[in-house]
Amino acid sequence: MADHASCPLCSTDVGHVIWRGADFRLIRAEDVLLPAFYRVVWTAHVAEFTDLTALQRMSCMDAVTLIEQTLRARLQPDKINLASLGNVVPHLHWHVIARWRTDAYWPQSAWSAAQREADTAQLDALRARLPAVDAALAEAFSARFGAN
């Protein structure tokens, strides 16, 4: 990809950085209605998963898996959504989103229209748990991929 000067994932973190390594970083997105929304963002400006070597692909998917495992263990969501779209931002990144049947979008995707009003108390309770989840993710990523 030639024009990465205007790429938002090259120039900014677009969220709260949990862990940063040489190949990728882990970010918690700032989504009001889906607070447990994480991204693995590849450092190099590539558009497709197949732009990576086999070893890089395994490392990237290991990161996605580690997020999913941590979210399931710490938050017990009804479902984890995984996505790598890149239609709007053609920079390799994976979305890992903890979902509940009561969230505003359920059962639709995170990019759909809201299906119901958000439960503010439930969102506040979830947000209160995120610092501990972030710390667990940072520790797990450092243990697996190296110091932050």
Image: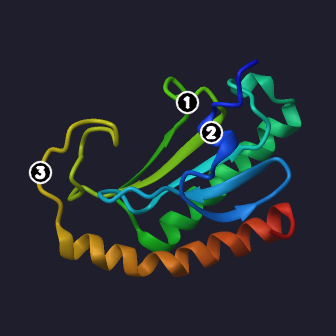
Three-letter code, disc 2: His
Residue on which disc 1 sits: 89
Please determine whether, in this image, residue 123 is positioned above or below residue 68.
Answer: below
Q: Quadrant of the C terminus?
A: bottom right
Q: Disc 3 versus disc 1: distance between alpha carbons?
A: 28 Å
Residue on which disc 2 sits: 93
CB under 8 Å between discs 1 and 2: yes
Q: Nearer the viewer, mark 3 or mark 1?
A: 1
Mark with earlier residue (3, 2): 2
Q: Residues within 10 Å of mark 1 (few under 14, many from 20)?
A: few
Which picture quadrant has residue 32? Answer: bottom left
**Coordinates of residue 70 in the picture (x, y in percent):** 57, 66
Residue on which disc 3 sits: 116
Which of the numbered marks, if any, corresponds to residue 33? none
Q: Nearer the viewer, mark 1 or mark 2?
A: 1
Element marked by disc 2:
strand
Q: Quadrant of the N terminus?
A: top right
- Residue 59 vs residue 34: left or right? right
Q: Disc 3 versus disc 2: distance between alpha carbons?
A: 28 Å
Element marked by disc 3:
loop
Three-letter code, disc 3: Arg
In front of the other: 121 or 64: 121
- Residue 80 vs residue 135: left or right? left
Element marked by disc 1:
loop
Q: Residues within 10 Å of mark 2 (few under 14, many from 20)?
A: many
Q: Residue furthest front?
A: 5
**Coordinates of residue 102 in the picture (x, y in percent):** 20, 59
**Coordinates of residue 101 in the picture (x, y in percent):** 24, 55
Please determine whether, in this image, residue 73 is positioned above or below residue 48.
Answer: below
